[in-house]
């Protein structure tokens, strides 16, 4: 499924549609190059889940957690860009963080990927035009648990 995201308002609206469909245990795997909008979309999802504060990029912390309440469902926002090997996930304790939560995963390929999980919604963000001045295109594909609830 392709979705045009011409501006920040469209990105926020798409994040809200994703958030409305999320259930505990789901993964939103955000793919795309540097500056593609992965963190911006994650911020839109978290805001729609009920987060009202800052959403720092987890580039250096790797994992940021958000509790319910105030969120509708707990969320883990992770940026795996700095991982050198997926085996590092055991050291980080990702499985413990994920229990009963939604995982928003940037650079999922650095963590070995999540696309084999039935609750994975993989979204590739591609800039439109030379430096993305035309917005983004989101290309989404969902695992079997996303049948009937694709945003």
Image (cartoon, grey):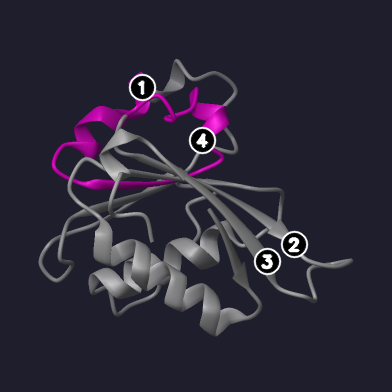
Cα distance, mark 3 to mark 1? 34 Å
Q: Which residue, as the protein is rendered here, is positioned at the far front?
A: 148
**Is residue 55 something one can see in this rendering?**
no
- 116 within the magenta span: yes
Q: Nearer the viewer, residue 90 or 142?
A: 142
Query: Which residue corresponds to mark 3?
Result: 136
- Between tags 1 and 4, which lies in front? 4
Query: Which residue corresponds to mark 1?
Result: 91
Identify the residue shown where x is 65% and y is 62%.
Answer: 137
Query: Which residue corresponds to mark 4?
Result: 108
Cα distance, mark 4 to mark 3? 19 Å
Instruction: List x then y, in percent, for residue 102.
Output: 26, 48
Cα distance, mark 1 to mark 4? 17 Å
Query: Which residue corresponds to mark 2?
Result: 127
- 25 within the magenta span: no
How crowded pointer 2 is (Cα within 10 Å; few <14, some 14-19, many 20+) is rated as many
Magenta span: 90-117
């Amino acid at each position: 499924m392709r979705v045009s995201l011409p501006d920040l308002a469209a990105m926020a609206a798409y994040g809200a549609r994703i958030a409305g469909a999320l259930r505990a245990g789901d993964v939103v795997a955000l793919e795309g190059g540097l500056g593609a909008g992965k963190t911006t979309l994650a911020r839109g999802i978290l805001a729609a889940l009920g987060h009202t504060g800052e959403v720092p990029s987890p580039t250096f912390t790797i994992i940021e957690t958000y509790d319910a309440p105030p969120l509708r469902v707990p969320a883990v926002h992770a940026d795996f860009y700095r991982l050198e090997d997926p085996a590092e996930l055991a050291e980080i304790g990702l499985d413990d963080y994920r229990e009963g939560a939604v995982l928003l995963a940037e650079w999922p390929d650095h963590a070995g990927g999540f696309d084999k999980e039935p609750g994975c919604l993989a979204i590739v963000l591609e800039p439109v035009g030379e430096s993305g001045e035309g917005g983004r295109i989101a290309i989404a594909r969902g695992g079997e648990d996303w049948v009937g609830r694709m945003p």
